[in-house]
Image: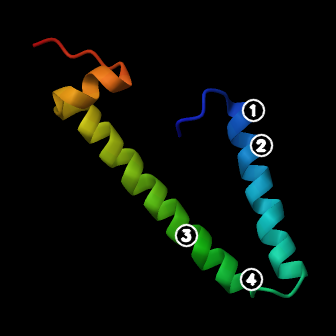
Amino acid sequence: MYFRTRRAAAGMTLWAMLHAGSRVYLGVHYPSDIFVGAMIGIGYAILFYRLMNFTTRTIPLFQSISGVRIAS
């Protein structure tokens, strides 16, 4: 959600999928392990994305760090 280009986001997604697939192929994890781990990771990503947006909009200290300008 914070990547500057879709190409970078697609590259990181592809890398994660290949890595997860290799874990199943090598027999280190069951497919259900990978699926549940991905769902937990997506949940945390959404949670922290929303938390970051909330803090950058409401706390003045973080507004200057993130570059968000809110008229007072």
How far apart marks 1 and 3 lie (CA) works out to 22 Å
Please, what secondary structure does the residue beneath circle 2 have? helix
Is 62 placed above or below 46 here? above
Find the residue positioned furthest to the right.
25
- Is 55 on the left or on the right of 16, as rendered? left
The reply to whether callout 2 and callout 3 are in contact (CB within 8 Å) is no
Point out residue 67 in the picture as x, y percentages from the top left corner. Answer: 36, 19
Find the residue positioned furthest to the left.
72
Q: Tell me which numbered mark, 4 or 3, is placed earlier along the sequence.
A: 4
- List the residue tagged with mark 1: 7
- List the residue tagged with mark 4: 31
The reply to whether callout 1 and callout 3 are in contact (CB within 8 Å) is no
The reply to whether callout 2 and callout 1 are in contact (CB within 8 Å) is yes
Point out residue 63 in the picture as x, y percentages from the top left corner. Answer: 26, 24
Is 51 placed above or below 58 here? below
Q: What's under tag 2, amino acid-wise?
A: Gly
Residue ID at (75%, 85%): 29
Depth check: give the residue in front, 65 or 28: 65
Is 63 placed above or below 70 here? below
The reply to whether callout 1 and callout 4 are in contact (CB within 8 Å) is no
How far apart marks 1 and 4 lie (CA) works out to 27 Å
Q: Residues within 10 Å of mark 2 (few under 14, many from 20)?
A: few
- List the residue tagged with mark 3: 39
- List the residue tagged with mark 2: 11
How far apart marks 4 and 3 lie (CA) works out to 12 Å
Q: What's under tag 3, amino acid-wise?
A: Met
Is 44 placed above or below 26 here? above
How far apart marks 2 and 1 lie (CA) works out to 6 Å
